[in-house]
């Protein structure tokens, strides 16, 4: 028998986070439409805190809870994707994939389109938080839990695509698992084909942060230049049925795909290159090698796969804290000295009135990003900052006592009249501070499933 011809699947990432550029996917879809073989588009729109924020929106309105800008990404590319048979996969359903599907149905109708929509559910364990939830961290206050989601794998994505889904909307689908699900659909790979799933996961990991791999996060002025960084192209993975993997990008776009950009992304957030745990496979990139096979085309070899872990990672969103910040600016001669005096006044006022608070002060223009909670970094920098004539004093606080935080912010505003000369531009904000906690849960206690709303 003659060997069957190699089949190439083409997968593009149109967004790497919820605040990405919606217009970038338009050229990506046009490029995918010109290719032969299976084509897929996915949008990765979740981070750790975005699910908790989405759950709060859902609590306020049961018709909300999906990614805020989901439809800014979807609306412009629905028609070309449906016309050219390019399935769309996203975890932008966040805390409410079914509500997202309902709105999507209305969007399709407004464009005179029809599509088969699938929702992947089962990641949300919020309703399972009873006394049997022994997988929760013992010291986690249950009354503060806003969201409880598990990173689920590719199985249900593949099921939805095999069922004819044009658009798959999920919640906490693990980032690379959206690509794994597409490649299992394209090539018929089994759920325990560890070697092929490892290549699929590597492809997903390279794509999941969008233009980060095409030069965005790689760019470093004066050290690592990239062409036309204002018009970065979205990444595309070409994955063969033989487990070949080539990374490229939208033709004619800015940015670049080089061995250097691919190396940085391949190792991004990988805790152990020999054992990167995902819901679908344990990925081993410790012996990976790269090869430039053309302009903006890099092949990745040597990916290894091992059985998937027995546990899945979960993520809790917790409320109960309040974050406040306020700032005031000083400029001209003596700006640093006046800002420092303002800081000293504020510190004394807060010590007197609100001694339980732990305020954090920055002098933006002298010390901010590198500043520490104790202020030692700032103190060292002040000795050499006399020539600075443009600074902003920033006060930041996190505490459970909302009223105390509000009072502290008001104290900064009083510096308009009670502080050093020349202060201006006070801005203040107060909001709930969401935090996250991770946990592990046995995979047999999580059951992802597909619905067709």
Image (cartoon, rainbow, N blue to C red):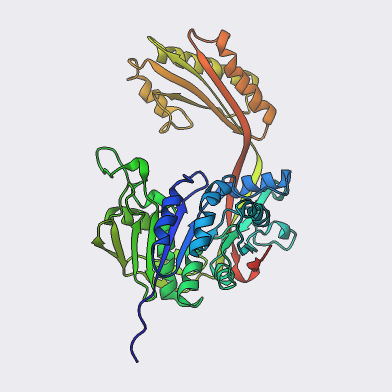
Q: Is residue 191 left or right of residue 334?
A: right
Percent x, y of residue 319? 66, 43
Quadrant location of the N terminus in the rendered image: bottom left
Percent x, y of residue 351? 59, 21
Using the image as rendered, state which of residue 131 and residue 391 is in the foreground.
Answer: 391
Can you name the residue that lies furthest to the front here? 112
Q: Residue sitting at 42 percent across and 19 percent down? A: 391
In the image, residue 451 sits, relative to residue 337, either above or below, namely below
* Observer able to see residue 273: no
Q: Residue sitting at 43 percent across and 58 percent down? A: 12
Q: Is residue 261 left or right of residue 430?
A: left
Q: Residue sitting at 43 percent across and 61 percent down? A: 33
Percent x, y of residue 218? 33, 47
Using the image as rendered, state which of residue 61 and residue 355 is in the foreground.
Answer: 61
In the image, residue 241 sits, relative to residue 145, either above or below, namely below
Where residue 168 sits, quadrant-wise, is: bottom right
Percent x, y of residue 261? 31, 53
Using the image as rendered, state which of residue 67 and residue 385 is in the foreground.
Answer: 67
């Amino acid at each position: 028998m003659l060997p069957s011809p190699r089949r190439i699947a083409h997968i593009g990432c149109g967004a790497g986070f919820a605040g990405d550029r919606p217009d970038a996917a338009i050229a990506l879809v046009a490029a995918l439409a010109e290719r032969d073989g299976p084509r897929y588009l996915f949008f990765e729109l979740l981070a750790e805190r975005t699910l908790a924020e989405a759950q709060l929106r859902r609590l306020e309105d049961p018709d909300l809870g999906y990614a805020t800008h989901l439809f800014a990404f979807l609306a412009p590319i629905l028609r070309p994707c449906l016309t050219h048979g390019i399935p769309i996969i996203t975890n932008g359903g966040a805390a409410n994939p079914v509500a997202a599907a309902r709105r999507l149905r209305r969007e399709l109708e407004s464009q005179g389109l029809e599509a088969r929509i699938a929702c992947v559910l089962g990641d949300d364990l919020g309703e399972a938080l009873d006394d049997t939830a022994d997988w929760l961290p013992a010291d986690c206050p249950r009354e503060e839990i806003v969201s409880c989601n598990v990173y689920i794998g590719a199985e249900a994505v593949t099921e939805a695509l095999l069922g004819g889904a044009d658009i798959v909307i999920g919640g906490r689908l693990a980032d690379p698992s959206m690509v794994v699900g597409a490649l299992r659909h394209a090539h018929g790979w089994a759920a325990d084909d560890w070697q092929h799933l490892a290549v699929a996961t590597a492809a997903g990991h390279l794509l999941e942060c969008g233009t980060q791999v095409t030069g965005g996060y790689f760019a470093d002025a004066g050290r690592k230049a990239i062409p036309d960084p204002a018009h970065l192209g979205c990444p595309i993975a070409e994955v063969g049925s033989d487990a070949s993997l080539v990374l490229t990008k939208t033709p004619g776009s800015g940015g670049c795909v080089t061995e250097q950009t691919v190396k940085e992304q391949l190792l991004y957030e990988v805790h152990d290159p020999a054992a990167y745990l995902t819901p679908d496979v344990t990925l081993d990139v410790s012996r990976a090698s790269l090869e430039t096979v053309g302009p903006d085309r890099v092949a990745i070899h040597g990916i290894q796969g091992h059985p998937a872990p027995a546990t899945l990672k979960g993520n809790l969103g917790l409320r109960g804290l309040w974050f406040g910040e306020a700032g005031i600016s000083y400029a001209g001669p003596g700006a640093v000295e006046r800002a420092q005096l303002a800081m000293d006044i504020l510190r004394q006022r807060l010590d007197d009135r609100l001694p339980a608070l732990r305020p954090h002060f920055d002098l933006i223009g002298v010390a901010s990003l590198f500043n520490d909670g104790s202020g030692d970094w700032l103190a060292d920098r002040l000795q050499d900052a006399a020539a600075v004539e443009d600074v902003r004093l920033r006060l930041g606080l996190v505490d459970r006592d909302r009223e105390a935080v509000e009072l502290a912010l008001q104290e900064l505003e009083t510096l308009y009249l009670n502080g050093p000369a020349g202060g201006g531009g006070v801005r203040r904000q107060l909001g709930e501070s969401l935090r996250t906690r991770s946990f592990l849960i046995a995979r047999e206690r999580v059951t992802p499933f597909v619905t067709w709303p």
